[in-house]
Structures are given as structure tokens and as C-alpha cells.
Amino acid sequence: MAVRAVRGAVQLERDEAGHMDEQVGELLTAILERNGLTSDDLISIWFTATPDLHSDFPAAAARKLGFADVPLICAQELDIAGALPRVVRVLAHIESDRPRADIAHVYLGAAAALRKDIAQ
């Protein structure tokens, strides 16, 4: 079993805790489903959020999905002029037999513009 990394992102419509929970939950669920994963396949997850998001930690949404024993951490994205606002990004480390080229990176909604080369 190899260690792989899965990327993803979602742009929030507004900075509200419930909305963040919903959108981050949708992103994590899509990452699991598109890669045929369960929570047992997760090693750790890094979350970043743009500086304009203050309502909650993205990791709180993962805890609400039941990822109680998965190490999670949050950080703030660089504050770059012209960057897409209200974005939560994910870098999940997983165990998978899939070749690196077969990993499905998930960019939902307007966040697909961030990585047109790998967005599914």
C-alpha cells in the first residue's frame, strides 16, 4: 500500500460556520467517493483557508463527519492580491494502491479554476 496525496478545494459563498461545514463536508465526501476511500484510508489532512474566512476551522467539518482519529491541521493561505476569495483547500494524505496518475483531485464549483489541469 502506497502513501498518496489528494488535493481539493471549494469556494464558499459566505463566511458562516454552517455553510463552511456543509461545503467542506461535501468536498471531503467527494474526495473519498471519487477515490474509493474510507476514513480508514486517511493518514492526515491539511486544510488551508483564505484570510477572509473567520467563522470556523475547516477541520471542524471533518470532525463532524466522524474523522475522530485522523490527524487534522488548519493554516492560513497567503494573502495574495487578486486571489480567489473564501477558499478552503485540502491536502489529504492517504493509503492507496492506485497509481499516482489515477488519484482524483476534487475542485468544486468556482474553485475548479484554481487547477484546471487536475480538477475532476
Image: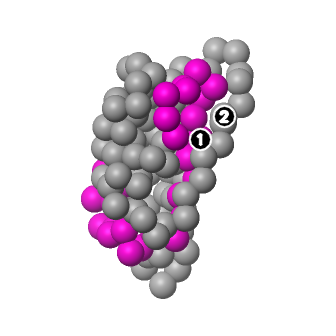
Residue 111 falls in image quadrant: top left
For residue 91, side relative to residue 104 (left or right): right
Residue type pointed to by label 2: Glu
Q: Is residue 95 visible?
A: yes
Residue 17 % position (x, y)? 41, 31
Give the residue furthest to the bottom.
1
Residue 73 lies within the magenta run:
no
Look at the numbered discs 2 and 1 and tell me whether their residues touch, using CB distance below 8 Å: yes
Q: CA distance from mark 2 to mark 1?
A: 6 Å
Q: Position of residue 112 (x, y in %)?
A: 43, 33
Q: Secondary structure at mark 1?
A: strand
Q: Quadrant of residue 10?
A: top left
Provide the residue designation for mark 2.
77
Question: Magenta part of the protein: which range?
Answer: 30-57
Q: Can you say whether 61 is above or below 40 in the image?
A: above
Residue visible at 42% across and 65% down?
A: 68
Q: Quadrant of the C terminus?
A: top left
Mark with earlier residue (2, 1): 1
